[in-house]
């Protein structure tokens, strides 16, 4: 077998056309921070690695388990029990051996957050849905450091995109979390992430969603759609080309329903429409909590 040596320009030659050779070299110098190595985190990393982004910081404290098999790119029989961040770093280096990856194997926390985000050109959110405290801190730090931040949420068989740009509406302004309890943050997160709610009508086993037990159903299709959408947003932000629809704009694409919705909600969760949806969500939760 003939092994040709890795040459960056050859490896990513087929990107040229949608990006210029100069832009490809720009992507090579960019640093993207991704917190979370689960459903979306892993596929974000590999998608951006194949785009030719040259530097990463990835954070995850977890190991691969059999229940990850339905959606996580790093989850295989050969990686069971292995640290997610290490496995994903290995996969990314297998695509680009020159890639620079800093692994935060304790995940992100209040102590290492500044180091994780400082000097990053973009933050891509891939934290667990229920990681409210650290997500709040992470987006606040992005805002403070002027780091663009994007989140693509896998919902049903589709994806919802929200982007927060420096100097524009912040995560806190949009979601209105403050010091509220986690259950309330959860409701506000769901409403704020996908105001269009395209995924709702085809949840065929409603009891699979359980906020109290912190679990919900997932599909790999949603994760892959998220990666395609988030990496495209990353390309626009990193190259300063193409319109970025930042919050209070949101986009949701649902492949199952063949629908695309763009939402513009000034005030975010302070918006009267959102306030109504939050009240409904609260009621549904209370009803679900009753034995």
Image (tube, grey):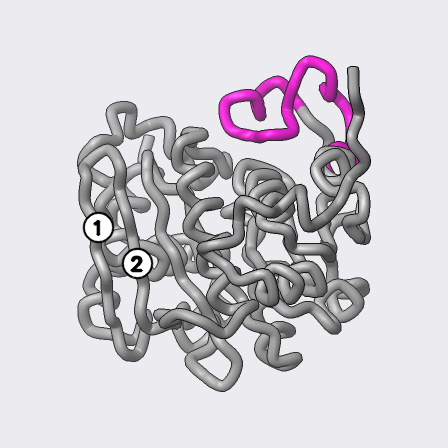
Left or right of 141 in this view: 272: left
Picture residue at 46% right of the left edge, 38% below the top: 223
In the rendered view, would you say 189 is above or below 178? above
Q: Nearer the viewer, residue 90 or 187?
A: 90
* Residue name at image x 21 percent, y 55 percent: 261
Tally the numbered discs. Answer: 2
Q: Which residue is mark 2?
A: 251
78 to the left or right of 234 = right
Q: Where's residue 268, x and y in %?
A: 32, 72
> In the image, is residue 187 part of the stretch drawn in magenta?
no
**Where's residue 214, x and y in %?**
50, 38
Above/below status of 111 relative to 229: below
Boundaries of the magenta span:
65-87
Q: Which residue is mark 1?
A: 260
Of labels 2 and 1, earlier in sequence is 2
Residue 62, position as x, y percentages in the image: 72, 36
**SS of the residue at dot 2?**
strand
Please tell me in which quadrant of the rendered image residue 91 appears.
Answer: top right
Check whether the beta carbons of the residues at disc 2 and disc 1 lie within 8 A of each other: yes
**Closer to the camera, 122 or 196?**
122
- Residue 237 visible: yes
Q: Is residue 61 visible?
A: no
Q: Quadrant of the N terminus?
A: top right
| Image quarter in which the C terminus is found | top left
Residue 27 position in % (x across, y down): 63, 61
For label 1, the SS is strand
**Mark 2 to mark 1: distance in Å?**
7 Å
């Amino acid at each position: 077998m003939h092994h040709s040596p890795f040459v960056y320009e050859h490896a990513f030659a087929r990107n040229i056309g949608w990006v210029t050779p100069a832009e490809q070299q720009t992507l090579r110098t960019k640093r993207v921070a991704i917190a979370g190595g689960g459903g979306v985190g892993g596929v974000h990393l590999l998608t951006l690695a194949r785009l030719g982004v040259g530097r990463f910081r990835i954070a995850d404290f977890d190991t691969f388990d059999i229940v990850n098999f339905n959606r996580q790119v790093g989850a295989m029989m050969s990686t069971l029990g292995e640290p997610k961040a290490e496995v994903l770093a290995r996969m990314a280096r297998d695509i680009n051996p020159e890639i620079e990856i800093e692994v935060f194997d304790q995940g992100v926390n209040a102590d290492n957050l500044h180091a994780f985000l400082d000097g990053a050109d973009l933050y891509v959110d891939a934290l667990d849905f229920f990681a409210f405290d650290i997500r709040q801190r992470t987006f606040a730090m992005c805002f403070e450091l002027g780091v663009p931040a994007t989140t693509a949420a896998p919902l049903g068989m589709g994806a919802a995109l929200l982007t927060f740009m420096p100097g524009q509406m912040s995560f806190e302004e949009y979601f209105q979390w403050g010091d509220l309890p986690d259950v309330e943050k959860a409701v506000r997160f769901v409403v704020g992430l996908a105001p269009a709610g395209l995924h709702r009508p085809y949840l065929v086993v409603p009891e699979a969603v359980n906020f109290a037990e912190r679990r919900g159903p997932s599909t790999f299709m949603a994760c892959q759609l998220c990666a395609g959408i988030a990496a495209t947003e990353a390309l626009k932000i990193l190259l300063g080309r193409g319109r970025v629809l930042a919050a209070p704009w949101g986009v949701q694409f649902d492949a199952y329903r063949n629908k695309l919705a763009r939402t513009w909600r000034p005030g975010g969760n302070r918006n009267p429409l959102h306030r109504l949806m939050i009240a409904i969500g609260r009621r549904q939760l209370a009803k679900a909590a009753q034995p």
